[in-house]
Image (cartoon, rainbow, N blue to C red):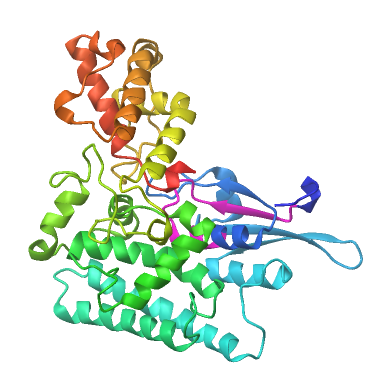
Amino acid sequence: FDAASEDDVRITVYLDPAKWCPYCMRVQMQLEMKRIPHRIRTVNMRCYGDKPEYYLQKVPSGLLPAIELRSEDAGGVKRSQLVTESLDIMLLIEKEFPTHTPLLPPANSRLRDAVPQLLKLERDIFARWCGFMFRPWASERERAGFEEALSAWSAALTRLAPGTRFMLGNEPSLVEVVSAPFFERYVASALYWKGMRVRDPAGPFQAIDEWMAALEANVQSYRALMGDTYSHAHDIPPQYGSASFDRKNAEQIQARVDGWAGNEWSLPLEPLDINSLEPYAGHLRAARDDGLGMAHRLEACERLFKNHEKLVPFMLRSIGHRPRTVTAPLSDPDARCNEADLAALREPLDAVLARVAMWLLDPSFSPSNAQLPAAAAGCNATDRTRLVRCLAYLRDRIGVPRDLY
């Protein structure tokens, strides 16, 4: 962001590469929204990989995120400050970079005085969510507690700056940056494990739905880092533990999210609407749509073609060397593809990916008339089985929209 040289980059930030960590996401959002020059170093979360030794020497606990902030005093003495804990990091960034799109209201104002209570409420919602999600045999009391906390957030949205898009006005503030990464996880997990729709334009938390739609429509950094319901449903348990499952209310929804029922995983894809399992996001509501979601299909295909050289070796990890060294079931940090497989299956996999893109763009496509490209059709039965495994491996690990960026 407008850095003339490497010397202008004062911040090195350490984040998780998979974008699973909401604490990392909030720091990255702040840096991007303020357009502060920074360099990113990626460090695995323990649930999906090992921590590099250099990072453990800096941060013995291994916790993420962390920043190193370089500064120089009036006497020309340079120093470097290492800071962990995301909220401490964010408050320090606001202090050190006050002219880069301030995210806090003016000091001693009514809205500034409201910030500490809002940050406290955000942590209360998190605690209530944990009780509702992870306490074995969570009762109606835990659900009521979570709903009560969400209602308090809804009330604050309508009370503090009525008639505006965000909590403190028409521009997003530090309150949004701190809370938004968690709210998208609340929405996905409540739906997947409890059958509870937090986001419903006609539901009890309409103010939260409109607030999140405004984030999606107006905050590019948030939109780029968002996850989908499937991704959050499967990346939360390795971090927090298994959630308690409400079979009565969530069994059918869980089956649809995971692709065992419904048509969410089948081509041709249906455009998102208010009844979809994925939030009908703000930028989709505002967009002029042809009824087919063609603009979004084009975007997905463009990224598929741009990244195909990396995708094929990634897919081939499914039939390569896959030692299980981490707890996250969809993570394979130590998996590698075999060179022999790459030589034998690169062309068929490339051809199949191209055909998938064509099917994605063709509204008339039907699985009943699908034909394999010649490069794949010529494979023997064993290699066809391996192609299917490779495609399933990719399908199960795509996060939308994060993997489009």
**Residue 390 or 285: which is nearer the viewer?**
285
Image x and y of residue 85, in percent: 54, 66
Q: Is residue 296 visible?
A: yes
- The residue positioned 22% from the left and 46% from the top of the image is 264
Is residue 208 shown left or right of residue 386?
right
11 drawn magenta: yes
How many marks the image carries: the answer is 0
Residue 340 lies, with reference to residue 187, above or below; the image says above
- The residue positioned 32% from the left and 50% from the top of the image is 231
Image x and y of residue 12, in percent: 66, 53
**Residue 308 or 73: which is nearer the viewer?**
308
Residue 200 falls in image quadrant: bottom left
Residue 165 lies, with reference to residue 306, above or below; the image says below
Is residue 381 shown left or right of residue 210?
left
Residue farthest toward the left in the current orientation of the protein: 248
Is residue 22 shown left or right of residue 83?
left
Q: Is residue 65 visible?
A: no
Is residue 73 shown left or right of residue 265?
right
**Residue 378 or 210: which is nearer the viewer?**
210
Magenta residues, start to end: 9-27
373 drawn magenta: no
